[in-house]
Image: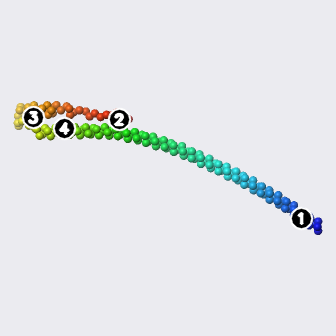
């Protein structure tokens, strides 16, 4: 019996040793699977990171392009604004000059209406009694000083 118990304890050691080796092999296999899985996960993570970086770089390029277009649009709009502002300034000067001329003409008409006896009396049907105006300033044929062109500076316009 001693030998059978010795044999049985020896075989149990062999079983323990075999199961330990199996356990160690199973742990090694799991460790290898975990390492492979970790490597694959790290590779996928690097690929996602690279894709995200590529997407961000493409977005930066697109935003820079849009920014450049907006700056060009603002510059063109500013130039148009300055041109229109210069044109408006010229038109305001012309309106002022024409208003002044109109007022002068209205003053002359009022003066002539108030002093219509200056030209002499024209009897009904008697055109031979018409006399020359006393003052050449009131002569409507001599009002050339009122018929002057409107001058405006166009140097401010930048087309």
**Tag 2's secondary structure?**
loop
Give the mark nearest the N terminus, 3 or 1.
1
Is residue 97 something one can see in this rendering?
A: yes
Residue 45's spot in the image, x, y percent?
A: 65, 51
Q: Quadrant of the C terminus?
A: top left
Q: How would you rate the neighbour count of disc 4 (Cα within 10 Å): few for under 14, some for 14-19, many for 20 or more? A: few
Residue 36's spot in the image, x, y percent?
A: 72, 52
C-alpha gap between disc 1 and disc 4 = 139 Å
Name the residue at 35% across, 35% down: 156
Residue 105, label in figure: 4
Residue 156, label in figure: 2
* Callout 2–callout 3 Cβ contact below 8 Å: no
Displayed quadrant of residue 13:
bottom right
Which residue lies under the disc numbered 3? Answer: 119
Q: Quadrant of the N terminus?
A: bottom right
Residue 9, label in figure: 1
């Amino acid at each position: 019996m001693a030998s059978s118990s010795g044999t049985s304890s020896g075989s149990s050691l062999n079983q323990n040793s075999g199961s330990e080796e199996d356990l160690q092999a199973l742990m090694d296999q799991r460790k290898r699977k975990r390492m492979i899985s970790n490597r694959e996960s790290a590779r996928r993570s690097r690929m996602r990171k690279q894709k995200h970086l590529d997407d961000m770089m493409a977005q930066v390029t697109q935003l820079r392009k849009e920014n450049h277009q907006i700056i060009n649009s603002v510059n063109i709009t500013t130039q148009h604004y300055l041109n229109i502002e210069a044109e408006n300034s010229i038109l305001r000067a012309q309106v002022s000059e024409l208003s002044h001329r109109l007022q002068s003409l209205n003053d002359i008409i009022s003066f002539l209406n108030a002093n219509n006896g200056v030209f002499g009396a024209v009897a009904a049907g008697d055109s031979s009694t018409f006399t020359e105006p006393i003052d050449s300033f009131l002569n409507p044929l001599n009002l050339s000083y009122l018929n002057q062109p409107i001058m405006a500076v166009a140097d401010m316009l930048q087309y």
